[in-house]
Image (tube, helix red, strand yellow):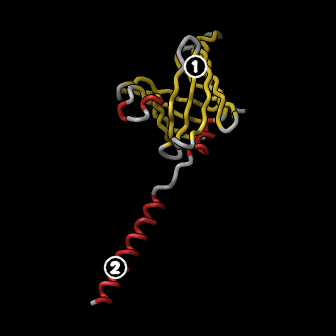
Amino acid sequence: MKTSVKFIALFITLTVLTLSTLAQKESPVIDQSELLKKFEGTWICEIGKDTIAQWDMIPFGTGFDARLKYTSLGKIIKEGKGLYGYDKILDKIVEAGITKGKDIAVYVMWFTSDTRWVLIPYSDLPAPEKAGFKMEGEFRSPDNLVETNFENNRIVKIKSWTKAKQ
C-alpha cells in the first residue's frame, strides 16, 4: 500500500512539473526593451491628399527621441516631440510627448507579441480595458507598421507607416 501511494505521489509530481515546463515554453517572455528598437528610423505616412506625416525615432540612451511633423503642400501644419523609454518596474514602454499648441501627453505601451503592441494613456494603466483612447499596432514587416486608433472601443483612424530608406 505504501509503495502504491509513493508511486502515485511521484507520478503526480512529475506530471505537474512536466506540465508547468511545457506551459513556460508555450508562453515566452516578451522583451519589451528589445522590441522597442524596431521603431528606430524615419517613418512616413500619407495622412490625406497632399499631407504627409514624418516620424523620426532617433536613438537616445536606452530609448528614443521622437520627432513628428505633418506637412501639407510644403508647409508644416503639425509638429511634436516625444521621448520613449522602457520602464523596468512597469515592464512597459513609456512615452511623453508634446505637440505644438497642446498639453503634454503621457502614454504607456507594451508588446503583446513580437509584432503587435497596445498603447493607452498612462492615466488609464490601472484599468486598460476602460481607456477612452487606445492604439493597437502591428509590424507587418520590418519596413511597414499599421496603427489602429480607437475611441470608446470604436475605430476612428488607421494609419500605415513605411520606413524610409536610409
Residue at point 40%, 67% (across, down): 19
Residue at point 53%, 46% (across, down): 114
Residue 23 in percent (x, y) is at 43, 61
Which structural element holds mark 1?
A: strand
Q: Quadrant of the C terminus?
A: top right
Relative vertical location of residue 50 with respect to residue 118 in this rendering, above or below = above
Q: Select label 1 or label 2 by which is in front.
A: 2
Number of residues whose C-alpha sits closer than 10 Å to that of mark 1, classed few (under 14), some (14–19) or many (20 or more) = some
Q: Which of 31 and 73 is in front in this view?
A: 31
Residue at point 46%, 66% (across, down): 21
Relative vertical location of residue 25 with respect to residue 92 in this rendering, above or below = below
Residue 98's label in the rendered image is 1
Q: Name the amino acid type tagged 2.
A: Ala
Residue linked to disc 2: 9
Which structural element holds mark 2?
A: helix
Q: Name the amino acid type tagged 1.
A: Ile
Q: Which of 24 and 42 is in front in this view?
A: 24
